Amino acid sequence: MSHFIEVQGAEMVFTTRKGRFHALRDIHLTVDQGEFVTLIGHSGCGKSTLLNLLAGLTRPTAGVLLCDNREITAPGPERGVVFQNHSLLPWLSCFENVYLAVERVFGAAETKTQMKVRTQAALELVGMGHALSKRPHEISGGMKQRVGIARALAMEPKVLLMDEPFGALDALTRARLQDELLKIVARTKSTVVMVTHDVDEAVLLSDRIVMMTNGPAATIGQILPVTLPRPRDRIELAEDREYVHARREVLDFLYTRQGHVEKTAA
């Protein structure tokens, strides 16, 4: 299995008005093709900072990040990003929001008809084929996130990077989209790195959970493999011994070893 992502000794120091802030230190991480990895930790532990480095939105102060054996120096179509805020353009329809991204990536290689087919297929994949002509203000928060995911998937990225994509949604909508994401990833065999603050979400979705120490100068404290068989069913897993053990391991790291309780972590 080849490493799609490699993080080699990454450091991140920000210069602020109050001086230098050491966000991340000595980050070493590999992610294999088709693997689903979540980053979890308390607020300020650098989860989103690490994801932004992988997205190429910021450059590390030290160290190297690679995607498919190429150094990450800027954003690229091989890395699709889904933010907590859906970031849809309000004056465009759902179809147009996705088509805009498709055109940027495939405009030189495909016809308009091919790009329209690609756009519609991505929206249907996330269950939004019925809302192609609707604008963002006409659909719910969960639907907006589905369109954001469709936009990222339509670019056929090698890696899908997700920054708490369900964090702003109510519990029922979040659960439904988690289940939908499990199906999509199984179908597309995507490589995923996702930031979360939700322990149950991490255990349900992940092949490995990367637990970050508290900041400043946060680093990787522990990596927990989750060997639960797929496909996964949240109801069946609720009393599964391995699921309960993995959940306890993450809670123990966050609450006991990091010595800080965050209300959103449970």
Image (cartoon, rainbow, N blue to C red):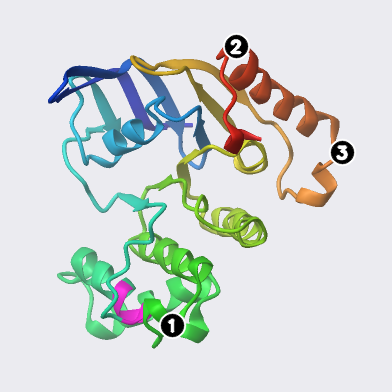
| Residue plotted at (48% across, 50% down) | 190
Q: Is residue 248 magenta?
A: no
Q: Earlier in the sequence, mark 3 or mark 2?
A: 3
**Please, what is the three-letter code of the amino acid marked with disc 3?**
Glu
Disc number placed over residue 257 in the picture, else none: 2
Q: Gap between marks 3 and 2, in whole Å?
A: 25 Å
Q: Is residue 207 left or right of residue 30?
A: right
Residue 187: x and y, percent?
A: 57, 59
- Assign a secondary structure to mark 1: helix
Residue 239 numbered tag: 3
Of the pair 245 and 8, the residue shown nearer to us? 245
Residue 177, percent from left and from top: 59, 60
User: In terms of sequence position, does the residue under pointer 3 or pointer 1 come before the other?
Assistant: 1
Q: Which is in the foreground here, disc 3 or disc 2?
A: 2
Residue extent of the magenta highlight: 93-97
The label nearer to you, 3 versus 1, is: 1
Q: Quadrant of residue 58?
A: top left
Front-most of residues 138 and 17: 17
How would you rate the neighbour count of disc 1 (Cα within 10 Å): few for under 14, some for 14-19, many for 20 or more? some
Q: CA distance from mark 2 to mark 1?
A: 45 Å
Badge 1 is on which residue?
Answer: 138
- Which image quarter is the C terminus in? top right
Q: State the residue at coordinates (27%, 71%).
A: 89
Q: Residue at x 40, y 85 (%)?
A: 134
